[in-house]
Image: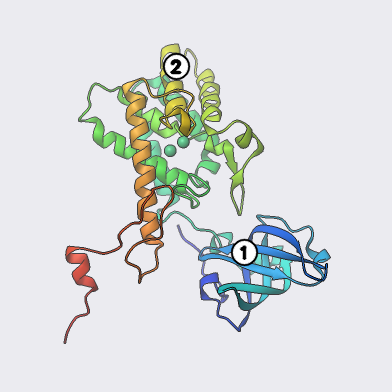
Amino acid sequence: MPIRKRPEFKRINELQEGNVEISYFLVESIDIRTKADGEEFMAIRLKDRTGITDSRIWDDIDRYRELKAGDVVKAEVDVRTYKGKPSLNIQRMRLLQERDFEEGFDVRWLQEWSEYDIDELWARLKQMVDRIEEEHIRHMVHSVLGAKEEVFKKLPAAQSMHHPYFGGLLEHTVWLTDNCLRLLDNYRELNKDLVIAGAVLHDIGKTEELAGESRVDYTTKGRLIGHIIQGRDLLRKHAALVPDFPDDILLHLEHIILSHQGEREWGSPVVPSTPEAFFLHIMDNFDAKMRMFLYAMKNAPADKEFTDYHRALERRIFLGRVGKEAEAEEPIEE
Ligand SMILES: [Fe+2]
Ligand SMILES: [Fe+2]
């Protein structure tokens, strides 16, 4: 993913106490609170690719009442610490303007993206879809991808659980589908076409459940209906566009989408009851958890032996290295 060179401004993890800096930030959340003297102040969570920080606006907050989560701002901040954590006093702030883009601003400076080239991932996904032999299924899957390309290439797989970065949904879908294809040779009883279509489409409802340009959040429909049912609706809609789409295939694919979360308490209305649906649920869970594991390790501080307790994985992860990797970390003696 080519990212244009950023101008010289400090990232959140580079801010140093006592300095005044001008930088770009994403507004994560805003809270209006009251000081001891009854005056209101604003507590704003600011974010960029490198981290998240608290900030305050103490005076004249009426100027900023229109500000909302997801806005991008340019701000002059006085870097302080509050209760041992960095806290920024915002001295001046304005919303991002057209001229920032003219000067080369790219919202990706602030967002975390997949490390992989998005267009390459997309091409790989379409190639895997081409391996579907049954042509109604193949046409239907291409029809869904054609309709959802723009959002599919951009969204994270989840807000925070797994692959929480832009492009994460596509990365997860490509890895899952590829993993399924690799294992299918050992389970030849399974219908390959259903597995590929199920893998590619299992989370397609997320393209309607989540939305946002600079910051991703649940849509109203996403909160009220959820990606499982939204995915089934999309599947039905696109199957109806393919003349004579077979009813039995549609039923199998609906079951894969509806059951992919595996358990009723994990949000699926039915448990996987076909070998293809069971396989897909396990593989989906595997890719999501494996990436969660590796992502937690990647983001852990270099000097720690274990990560912080990971709530979703219910453990701390050991950060020590073994074998050659450990040797490479040893200082070389002259
Ligand atoms: Fe899902
Ligand atoms: Fe998934």
Where residue 22 is drawn, which disc sits there? none
Q: Which residue is mark 2?
A: 251
Mark 2, residues whose alpha carbon is within 10 Å: few (<14), some, or many (≥20)? Answer: few
160 versus 226 height, above or below: below
Q: Is residue 80 visible?
A: yes
Q: Position of residue 176 (x, y in %)?
A: 36, 39
Q: Residue furthest front?
A: 36
Question: Which residue type does callout 2 highlight?
Answer: Leu
Quadrant of the rendered structure where residue 12 is?
bottom right
Lateral position of residue 293 relative to residue 46, left or right = left
Q: Which residue is mark 1?
A: 46
Give the quadrant of the N terminus: bottom left
Quadrant of the rendered structure where residue 61 is?
bottom right
Q: Position of residue 115 (x, y in %)?
A: 41, 56
Mark nearest the camera among 1 and 2 is: 1
Quadrant of the rendered structure where residue 211 is?
top right
